[in-house]
Image (cartoon, rainbow, N blue to C red):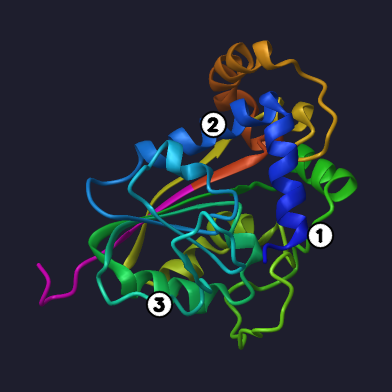
Amino acid sequence: MSDPRLAAHRAVWEEKPVLRAIYGDYYKRLAAACRHGRSLEIGGGTGRVRHYLPAAVLTDIQPAPWLDAVADAQALPFADSSFDNIVMLDVLHHIQSPPTFFTEARRVLRPHGRLIMLEPAMTPLSRIFYVLFHPEPVRMKQDPLAEATPDPARDPYDANQAVPTILFRRARARFERRFPDLAVREVRLLSLFAYPLSGGFRRWSLIPTWAVKPALALEAALLPLLGGFMAFRLFVMLERLPGSDEQ
């Protein structure tokens, strides 16, 4: 049986075309970054990636009828070198032990396979929004590279929205030393005002659906100037480097 929180999440998705328009842009970015080949989505609770990667294998830690498998990102039930891409939207900051997950991601990716993530970004303005108006906590002092034993009884909705920013903007050098075979190919700030104005998965919105497309175009023009101050999203792409026997 699906978690009632997931059902509520999907209900808001169906009721808010403005939300679908904004997240549609996110999914398009994830799909466009994929290599040709077999793709795995981790955290596919909504099932929406099917519209953009029709052949993707969908997984989530909690069951749902549209998934291909129930799987913990920290113990993936797939053979070594099974996928050319792993895509994740708003998943990394929910994972209890990021080092355990990255070890698993490296294992199931083929040489030159990509791990593509879109996550919350902590900038001076967005951090205020996430702290005051988003239900998930922001803990900037957490060390996401610290060793932790995954707890199978942990609530899958537990989170720290700061994890992606800490890993790939504050502690990137440490991450690269820890995972030298997961090369950081891209770290990019996205999303200025359309997302917060939409209200996310809350039922209210301060932006009409028709305004999303021009708002996103305006954001693209303003990101070089304002991204470091107010971007709400972080796009990250890693590449699994081949070993000496996989050249």
Residue receiving disc 1: 137
Q: Label 2: how many residues lie within 10 Å, few (<14), some (14-19) or many (20+)?
A: some
In the foreground, 55 or 30:
55
Question: What residue do we see at 84% from left, 43% from top?
Answer: 128
Quarter of the figure with residue 229: top right
Residue 221 is drawn in which quadrant? Answer: top right
| Segment tinted magenta in the rendering | 236-247
Circle 2 residue: 24
For the residue marked with disc 3, what is the amino acid? Pro
Dividing the picture into quadrants, the one containing residue 193 is top right
Q: Quadrant of the C terminus?
A: bottom left
| Front residue (pair 124, 102) | 102
CA gap, disc 1 to disc 3?
29 Å
Instruction: Tell me if 18 is positioned left or right of 78 in this view.
Output: right
Residue type for callout 2: Gly
Residue kind at label 1, given as amino acid type:
Pro
Can you give x and y, in whole percent of width and height, for residue 95 in the image?
61, 69
Which element is circle 2 on?
helix
Nearer to us in this view, 142 or 130: 130
Circles 3 and 2: CB distance less than 8 Å?
Answer: no
Q: How far is the residue under mark 2 from the one under mark 1?
A: 25 Å
Q: Name the image quarter holding the N terminus.
A: bottom right
Q: Which residue is mark 3?
A: 77
